[in-house]
Image: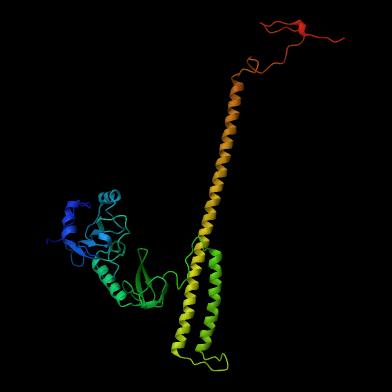
Amino acid sequence: MSGYQASPTIFLRPEEFAEDAESRLGRANGNTYQRKPGISNVHDGQIMIRLKKKRFIILDYGFIPNDHDHEIAKAVPHISIPNGGGTSKCATKDCPRIGVPVLLYDSEPNEPMSLYLRGGLCFSCQRNLNEKRRTQRKRKSDGLTVGEVRIGGGMPSIGSAPGNGGSRFKFNDQIVELNPDAVVINGPVDGARTRGPDYRCPEIGSDLLRIASELSHETLSLLQHSSGVQTGMEQPVVTTSSVNAMYQKAFLSVSKATFLLTQWKASWDENIAANIAQTTAAEAATASANFDSRVLDEAVASATATMHAEGFPDQLGFPGHAQGPPALGGPLPAGTMQNNNDRHVEI
């Protein structure tokens, strides 16, 4: 296999990789085929990866897209250039390789973006991380999962933060450095609900008050127990196991309360936004109706003025304003006859 040479364009013709996908890649999820070798400490080259449901992608860590490539990516759904594609460094500490590849081809572009594109890691680091996660799952390790709470350095990370002994995490495409004593709540905790159409501020607030009350009692019991305060006729036996159990119970309650508080605030914000949108729409409708009425009035007034100015015929067919009936004995308009029989005088 020859050394890496950048392709002249981001667009690959299907015949260029059809044989690789059929004969060299393999059918199992996770299979890879190196189409172009990488450059040491620079990038991982061009790699074909088999994903689930027969999907496969072709990534190029050494391709630097130009403006024309970006235009092609906008027009062709199978091609994608993520932010930083071909230029952003790997998020792993001290790794000098490119961490965001360019997607030359995706056989199923409607599926969610692969972790290789959004993880911020070079292929080698992402592969090592995937393998580490698989090993942890097999061993049923205590890795951070949805609905769990983890504290400080016990959480898996993508590297160590310099200076403070903390950890670096990828969050919304940003590298976040956490202190060693940081607490992370990853989603709903132990049955706490996420806000929804039937679970808004009133319902969330009720649950939040209940849990806060439970937390107060649990915390008081923990402090009294740990200090050996007599709570009854018998002196409590303070052990590490009993304190840990009470601590975990109180910590779980405070985690649930924290999560519900964020859900209450998010629900409140959504309600305010909906009200503002509704008010804005109503004001726009009223303004539109007033405008239409004003335009109609102005049009009628303008038309009336034009009729008078141009001497529009009156109801008798004479130009100008309508005239009253001629006086008795007075002259009649030309072309008319006076009928004296119409006159009737009572004596």
Direction right: furthest residue: 347
Which quadrant of the rendered structure holds the C terminus?
top right
Q: Nearer the viewer, residue 158 or 240?
A: 240
**At 56% across and 72% down in the image, what residue appears?**
209
Q: Is residue 86 visible?
A: no
Direction bottom: furthest residue: 234
Relative vertical location of residue 282 with respect to residue 291 in this rendering, above or below: below
Left or right of 224 in this view: 124: left
Left or right of 197 in this view: 158: left
State how many labels appear.
0
Left or right of 16 in this view: 98: right
Determine which quarter of the picture holds residue 162. Answer: bottom left
Where residue 72 sits in the image (x, y, percent)? 26, 49
Which quadrant of the rendered structure holds the N terminus?
bottom left
- The colour scheme of the drawn protein is rainbow
Q: Nearer the viewer, residue 347 or 95?
A: 347
Q: Nearer the viewer, residue 34 or 99?
A: 34
Where residue 196 sits in the image (x, y, percent)? 49, 62
**At 76% across and 8% down in the image, what residue appears?**
342
Left or right of 141 in this view: 105: left
**At 51% across and 69% down in the image, what residue appears?**
261
Where residue 214 sits in the image (x, y, percent)? 54, 77
Q: Is residue 269 visible?
A: yes
Direction left: furthest residue: 1
Determine which quarter of the picture holds residue 4. Answer: bottom left
Relative vertical location of residue 341 with respect to residue 27 in this rendering, above or below: above
Where residue 276 sits in the image (x, y, percent)? 54, 54
Relative vertical location of residue 283 with respect to residue 338 in this rendering, above or below: below
